[in-house]
Structure formats: C-alpha cells, structure tokens
Image: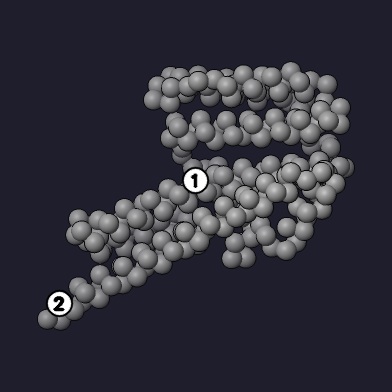
Amino acid sequence: MLKNMAEVDQVAAARAMLEMMISDNQELQDYFRETVEKLAAIEALPPGIKAVQFRQLQQSGGLEFRGADIRLLAEKSAKKTLSPPQFIQRTNRRLRNTNALIDAFLKREDFDGGKELREKIETLTNEVLDENNSQSVIDFRNRVEELRTSEIFSTYSKIKMEFVKKDDELRAEAEIIATKEVLADAEMDAQERGEELNDLQEKMESGEISPEEVQEKMEAMEEQDGGN
C-alpha cells in the first residue's frame, strides 16, 4: 500500500511540475506575441515618434519578462543547432531585416552602395530552396556567407556602426529590428518547447513513459534553459 501511495505521489508531482512548465511556456509565448504586436505598431509610426515610443517601451519594462531583458535570449538562440528549415527561415528573416535597415539608410542617402546590396539580398531571399536537399542548403549558406564577407557588406556594417552612435532615430530603428529578430527566434524556441512538453504529458498519461522519466526530461529542459 505504501508503495502504491508513493507511486501516486510521484505521478502527482510529475503532473504538477509538467502543468506548471506548460503554463509558464504558454505565458512566455503570449508575451512574445504581444510584444511583437507592440513593435509592429511602433514601426508604423514616423521616425521621430517611433524612436520616442520605442524608448518608452524600454523604460516601462515592456522588453522584460519577469524582470529579465528578453534581448539576452539572443546569445542562447545563436548557440542553438538549427534544422535546415529553421536555418533557412531564420537566415531569410535576418536578411529581410537587414534590407529594412538599408532602406532607412537610403532614405537618408547615407549609403551609396545600398541599392546594390539590397538587390543582392533580395536575390538570396527570393531563392526557392529544397530544404530536404542538404547540398542545396549548404550552397545557400555559402552564398550568404560570401555576401556577409563581401566588401559591400563590410562597408554597410561600418556605416551602420557609425550612424547608430550619433543618430538616435536610426539607432532606434536598428534596435527595433534586432529586438524583432530575438523575439522571432525565442518564439520559435518556445513553440518547440511547448510541443515537447505536450508530448511528454500525453506519453505520461498514456503510460508510455514513467513519471521518473518525465521528471528527468523536465530537469534536463530546465538545465538547458538556464534554470529559468
């Protein structure tokens, strides 16, 4: 009887921990979506107002989740191993974001090679890739790397560093774009984690895996997430 009670307690503990992690993950995903919507609304504003509104969002803690700046997630996302579809999706998104910043430079007529670089980036993002063909993905990655190490991209990077230091509107534009990238990566990670947690829940309830295994997997997830 005591053994049965211990087993029941173990199941209850695993279920409670799993439900808490699922709830926390959903709350995080909701936060990401809400913040993306706020940034989209700010992006639609004129440059001067856009910068003011973005600073207000920062100062009000709008870029923090439970006291932590969500932009710190960038380091974690950068270390993650991506599947070919994820790599293509993230790379194309970042290339499009680069073009958005190049457009901001062009409006100021601050980058002579901007149109050429924008066209090169558009050529890459318009490619139709077979994500199941490893060579196709490798070739795409090499073309992206070739562009990033090109002289024209190096010029862009130097101009960007120079102007974000002295132009608050452009600095805000760059920070908004960088924040959107972090949010997109983090939301993708959270969605994957949510799927993993739901799968664990289904397998535990069906008896496919034991509560001990569930707890071990959850502890591994928490360690991977940095204990958050």
- First in sequence, mark 2 or 1: give its number: 2
Disc 1 marks which amino acid? Met
Name the residue: 43% across, 22% down. 130
Q: Secondary structure at mark 1?
A: helix
Residue 71 visible to the viewer:
no
Nearer to the camera, 71 or 45: 45
Q: List x then y, in percent, for residue 35.
A: 62, 54
Q: List x then y, in percent, for residue 66.
A: 59, 65
Horizontal side of 167 relative to 123 (left or right) equals right
Disc 2 marks which amino acid? Lys
Asked where in the image residue 124 lies, by quadrant, the reply is top right
Q: List x then y, in percent, for residue 207.
A: 19, 59
Residue that carries the numbered disc 1 in the rendered image: 188
How many angstroms separate mark 2 from mark 1 (CA)?
41 Å
Q: Is residue 147 above or below residue 161?
A: above
Q: Is residue 85 above or below residue 199?
A: above
Name the residue: 48% across, 48% down. 189
Residue that carries the numbered disc 2 in the rendered image: 3
Horizontal side of 44 relative to 14 (left or right) equals right
Q: List x then y, in percent, for residue 170.
A: 81, 41
Nearer to the camera, 116 or 47: 47
